[in-house]
Amino acid sequence: MALIRRRKQPEDEIQQQNPDPKPDEDDDKEQRALKKSGKKNYSCVDNCCWFIGCVCSVWWLLLFLYNAMPASFPQFVTEAISGPFPDPPGVKCLKDGLKAKHPVVFVPGIVTGGLELWEGHQCMDGLFRKRLWGGTFGEVYKRPSCWLQHMSLDNKTGMDPPGIRVRPVSGLVAADYFAPGYFVWAVLIANLARVGYEEKNMYMAAYDWRLSFQNTEVRDQTLSRIKSNIELMVATNGGKKAVIIPHSMGVIYFLHFMKWVEAPAPMGGGGGPDWCAKHIKAVMNIGGPFLGVPKAVAGLFSAEAKDIASARALAPGVLDSDLFQIQTLQHIMRMSRTWDSTMSMIPKGGDTIWGGLDWSPEEGHSISKRKHRKNESESEVREAAFANYGRIVSFGRDVAEAPSSEIERIEFRGAVKGKNVANNTCRDVWTEYHDMGFGGIKAVSEYKVYTGDDIPDLLEFVAPKMMERGSAHFSYGIADNLDDPKYAHYKYWSNPLEMKLPNAPDMEIYSLYGVGIPTERAYVYKLTTAAECYIPFQIDSSAKDKSEEGCLKDGVYTVDGDETVPALSAGYMCAKGWRGKTRFNPSGIKTYVREYDHNPPSNFLEGRGTLSGAHVDIMGNFQLIEDVIKIAAGATGEELGGDQVYTGIFEWSEKIKLKL
Amino acid sequence: MVLRFRKLYFTEPTLSKSYESYETPKDEKKQATEKPKAEKKQEKGERNKKRIRWGCVNSCCWFIGCMCTTWWLLLFLYHCLPANLGVLKGPEPPGVRLKNEGLTALHPVVLVPGMVTVGLELWEGRPCSQGFFRKRLWGGSFTGILNRPLCWLEHLSLDKETGLDPPGIRVRPVPGLVAADYFAPGYFVWAVLIENLASIGYEGKNMYMATYDWRLSFQNTEIRDQTLSRLKANIELMYVTNGNKKVVVVPHSMGVTYFLHFLKWVEAPPPMGGGGGPGWCDKYIKSIMNIGPAFLGIPRAVSSMLSAEGKDVALIRSMDPGFLDSEILGLKTMEHMMRVIRTWDSVISLLPKGGDPIWGDLDSAPEEGHVCGFETKGFFQSNSRENNDSRNKDTRPRIEIKHGAKYGRMISFGKEASEQHSSKLHKVAPMELMQAVSNATCGEVWTEYGKINRQNIQKLADNKAYTAETFIDLLRYVAPKTMQRAEAHFSHGIATDLDDPKYGHYKYWSNPLETKLPYAPDMEIYSLYGVGLPTERSYVYKLSPSDKCDSIPFRIDSSAEGGCLRGGVYFTDGDECVPVISAGFMCAKGWRGKTRFNPSGIATYIREYQHSPPSLLEGRGLKSGHHVDIMGNAALIEDVLRVAAGASGEEIGGDKIYSDILRMSDRVNIEL
C-alpha cells in the first residue's frame, strides 16, 4: 500500500498546483468566468478533500493523544466526576486475604460462545478458523446468505450439514468478550485472576450451543472433555473440588452433564454414582433458566421477542417490507429452528409451574409495586392491572384479559391443516408454516389461549419436524415417579422436574440472578395480514396498558426478572423444588437463592454498571463477583449469608402445587 | 499500524505549523472550514493574502484528504473483490490433494511447539504493565516493547535464583491452537500445517497444541503449571474419544527435547514423574514426528549464552559497527538481552550435548570436509542423493583440506586459533586460573560478567580454543549462578552406564544420550528437517574493546572471513538453526536398530527436505528447508498428513537423505 501512496502523490500535487496560479492573472471577464468555473471545481471536490483531510488530521491527533495518555487517566476522570471508585471485588478480596483455592469451571450460555469455521463452502474461502459467531460479525454484512447457510444445522439430524464444520472456540477466549468491548466473562476472569487464578485452575467449558446437549458429546465429545478437565484440575490442585459457574443455558447444560457423568457408558460418561460428590464443591448458577423462558416460545413461534415487537411498534413495515426481498425474520427463523438447543428452553412443568387460565404464581406482583413498597406506604400502591400470566400465548388482547369462562376455544390438536399454501414459492424459506395451510393457521388462532401445558403441543402443531427432532432430546413435563426406568434416558437429564440430583450431600447449589427488570412472561398475538410468504403470526405490538406501570407493553406481559429469565424460572428449584430433602433432591444438597437487585449505571462512564441485574450484565455485578470469589476461596453458603431475596419468590413457590 | 504511522508522519508537521496550541484544534478547524466560503465574497487583494495561508495549511489538509479518500476507495475496492479472484491460484495445497485421494483423519494429533514461537500473556504484573491483563507480551504484535521496553523486559525475565516467576509477576503461556499458529501477524508457524490437517478432517477435538512456558526448565513447567500432567490427560482423553486410536505427536525445535522429557516423565513414578507406568507410551503413542529437532543441542545457544549474539547480530555489527554498542541512548541492548536470556533455563537445554565425541575435538569433527556452498549455489543439489539406493553408491565427498574448518572448536579466540593445529595452540586449563575473586562490581545489569575482573577475562581468551566439553567449563566460570541453577535441570554428557540409578533423575530426561527410550516396539520416531542452508556451527571470538565494567567482554569477531567462515561464524549444513548432526544423528545411528539408547528397537526414520528458495509470489515458500518455514513445506506436510491418516514409515518411503548425515554419524564413535 505504501507503493500506491507514493505513486499517487505527484498526481495530487499537480492537481493541487493547477488551481493556484490561475487567480493571479485576472482582468478579463472571460478569464474571470473561466476562473470561476475552475474555482467552482475547486470549491466542490477540493473542499471535500480538504474537509476530509482536516477531519482525518484531527482524528489522528486525538488518537495519538489517546494513545499517549497514561492508562489510569479515564479512571482519574471518572473518580473526579463520581467520587472514588470502589475497589474491584478481586482487589478487595485479596486485601481480605482470600487466595485461589478451588479450581473454577465456567459454562457459558447460549449465544455468548464464539463459533469458528473449520470447513465450509466456496463462499467462505479464507475464513478458516475465523469466528463466524462472536467477535465483529464482519461476515454477516459481507455475505449474509452464506453466513446463514453456515450457521444453520441440518434440519433433519440437527448436526452439521454436509461439507460444513463450524466448531466452538475453545479456551477462555471463547466467551470472555462476545463482541469487542462487550464483556461476558472477562470481568469475572479478571477479578478471579487477582486472587491468584490463572489458566491452570480456570477452565471454560465451551460447547457448541446450537446442538442439543447430548449431541455435543456425540459430535465433539464435549462432555467427556469437561469430565476429563475437571478430573485433571482436581488432581493437579491437590484434590480441591471444583466450583462450577454456569450461566444462562449453561445451567441446564450442566444439569445434563451431572446426570451424564454418573450414567453408565455408552449413553453416559461412566463416572460412577459418586463422581459429583468427589469432584464438585458447588454449582453457582448465574441467571439459570431452570424451568425455561417464555421468550423461547415467542422465538420459536414467530422469531420475535420484545425487542422486535417494539421495533415493529416504532416503525411498522420496516421488518415486513418485501421491497428488498430480505425477509429477515423468515431467514432468522429458518436458521434458529435448526438449532436444537433453543428447544431446551421451552417452559417446563406446564400449568403446574407457569399457571393456568385463571391463575399464575406471580399474579398480583409487579416490579413497580415492589419498588413502591420500599419507598412509599402500602396504601398508596395502586392495584396494577390484573394480568393473566398463565396465558403464555393469547390471540387478541381481549382474550388475554377475559375471564376464562367467556373464552370459546376450539381444540386445535388434530385439526386438519388444510391444503398447502398455493404453489409453494416460498419453499426455500424453511419455516414449516408453508406446510400448514390456512386451515391449520385458523385452528391455531381459534384455540385462543395457550397455557404452559399447551405450549409444547402448539409448537408441535406448527413445526412438527422441528419438534420431532427436539423431543428426542428434551422433555418438558413433570415426573410422577422418578424411579421409573424411562427417566434414565438422556432426554430427561436437562429437565430439573424429571431428574434426581446426584447423590452428593456436601455439594451446594446456588441460584444467583438479577431482579428488578421487566421480563417477558406472556404474549398477545395476532394473525398477520401480510403476503403469502410470511410468518402467519406476530406479536400484537399495539396492545398496551394505559398506565405507565402496567405490565402489558407492545403486546408483551412482563414480570420481575433479569430481562430474559423470569425470577420464577431462575429461583423456584432452589427456593422450593430442591430445598431440603425432596424427591428431586434425595441426598439433601444445600440450596441457596441469591438475588441481585438491578440498579442502572449512574452515569455513562460506568459502562454497563457494577450493580446491574440484567441477564448478561450481571456478570459484571461486583456483589455477585465477590460472592463467587468467596466461594472459590473456600467459603460455604452459610458464610456467604445464606439466601438474599428481594422478590416474592418464596410466596410464589408456595402457590405452586408440586409433589415434592 | 499503517494508520498510526501516517498519523505520526502527517499530523505533526501540519498542525504544529498552523496552530498555536494543540488544545483547541476542533474549534479552529471549524473556523477554518468556514473560511473558504467567506473568502469568495471578499476582495481580490485580501484573497491573495489569504491564499498564502491556503497554500500552506489548507493544501496540506487537502492533500491528506485526497490520500485518505484514495486509500478508502482502494480499500473498498479491495474488499469488494471476490475472495478467490484477488489471489493468484497457487498449487493445490497438500491437504486438499490428499483429501481427494481419500485420506481422512484417523489418529489424533498433538503439536508441541518449540522455543520462542509460543505466545506468552500477562496474568499479573507490576503497575507499569497496567492494561495488559491477558494480552500477549510475547508473540502477536509486540506492542509492549515499543511502548515500555524496560517494563517489558522485566516481565519477561524470570527470577534469577529460582528460575520461576519473580514475585508479583505471572506471565503464562497462551493455551490452544492460537498460541503458536502465527508468531506475529502474517508470520505463520503452525497455521499452514493446521489448515492442511483440517482439510482432511481434523478439528479441535482431535488436534491439541501442547503449549508450555518455553522460558522454564522442562520439569518446572510441571511444577508451576502442571503442563506435563495436562499433556498426559489430554493425550489420554483424545485416545479414548477417538475410538482408542493412538496419537501422532508432532514436536518442533525445542519441543522435541521437551517431548523426550515427557516420555520419561510420564512413565516415571510420582512424585517426580507422571505415574503412567511402563507401557504408557506403547499404549498411547503411534509415532513422534520431530520437525527440525535439536536433539543434541545447537551451537547457536553457545554464542547467545556467551555474548547474546548470533549470526544476525554479528552481521548487523559488521555492517554498522557501533550501532548496537552505542551508549548515546543508554540502550545497552545486548546487555539487557543477555540479562533476560540468562534467566531462562530452557536456553541451557539447547547447549550442545554429548561433548567432544559428538561435536568433535580440537582437531576433528564429524562434519570435516564439508564444503560450504556460499558461492556455488548448486553445490548441495549436485551433492545430494535422492534416495536410499543412490546413497550406497560411492560418491566421494569433495574434501578440501585447504578450507577444512575445524568445527570442533566451538569457540576460538582469533581466526588463527581456529585454524592452527592443536599442538600449536596455547592451552591453559581454565579452572585453575580462575581462583582469584574479582572485586569489580557493576551490579545493575546482571550478566555476571561484572563480577569477573579484567585479567581473568584476558586469561580466558588466552586459552584460544574451546570444544563442546570445555565450553561448558567456560560457562560455569563466566556465569556460575546461571549454570548452577540450570544444571539442576539439564545435563549435557554421555551416559556410560544407562542402568545407573542416577539416571532416574529428571535432569537427564531431555538428553537423548543419557536416557533410554521407553519400551514401545510399535512406536516410530521420525526426524524431519531441512538441509541446504548454511547453519552456525562454531564461532571466532575476540575481546570486546569496551572497558565499561558491565559490558559483555566477548564478542564475535565479525571481520573474520574465509571458506566456511563468514562474519566470524563457521557454517555447516543444516536448516539455518540446527546443524544436520544434531538433528539427524540419533535417528541415523544413535537409535537405529536396537541400541542401548533404544532397547526396544523403536523404528526410526530420517526425512530430509532440500531447501529451495521461494519465488517472489510464494511468500515463504512451499519447498523451504528453513527451521521455521519448513512448517509450510508441502512435502513435509504431506508426510505428516499421511502418517496421521494411518501410514507407517515404510509406506511413506522410509529414509530420504540429501546431506552427509550417514557419513558424519559413522565418524562419531560412541558406544551403542
Image (spheres, rainbow, N blue to C red):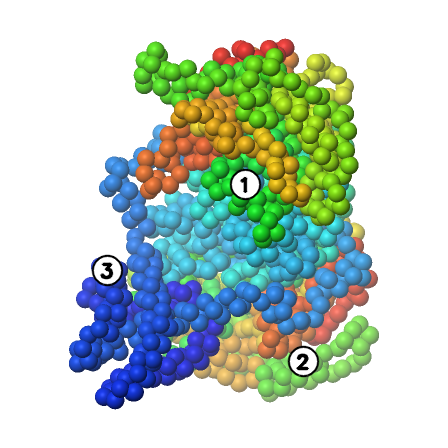
Q: To which residue does mark 3 refer?
A: B27
Q: How busy is the neighbourhood of tag 3: few (under 14 within 10 Å), some, or many (20 plus)? A: few
The residues tagged by marks 3 and 2 sit, at their Cα atoms, a distance apart of 68 Å
Residue at 78 percent of width and 61 percent of height: B100
Tag 1 residue: A112
Check the picture and name the quadrant holding the C terminus of chain A: top right
Q: Earlier in the sequence, mark 3 or mark 2?
A: 3
Q: Residue at label 2? A: B380
Q: Are marks 1 and 3 on the same chain?
A: no
- Residue at point 32%, 35% (across, down): A602
Measuring from the top left, give residue B255's x and y in whole percent. 60, 56
Element under disc 3: helix
Percent from the top left, x then y, of residue A230? 60, 34
Dot 2 amino acid type: Phe
Which callout, 3 or 2, points to the residue nearer the camera? 3
Q: Quadrant of residue B576?
A: bottom right
Could you give the CA–CA distance between mark 2 and mark 1, rounded to whole angstroms?
55 Å
| Image location (x, y in percent) of residue A386 | 48, 17
Mark 2 neighbour density, 10 Å: few (under 14) some (14–19) many (20 or more): many
The answer to whether marks 1 and 3 mark residues whose Cβ atoms lie closer than 8 Å is no
Q: Callout 1, which amino acid?
A: Thr
- Work out whether residue B273 or residue B150 is closer to the camera in this orientation and state it: B150
| Image point (73%, 15%), residue name | A483
Against A644, residue B479 (above or below) is below
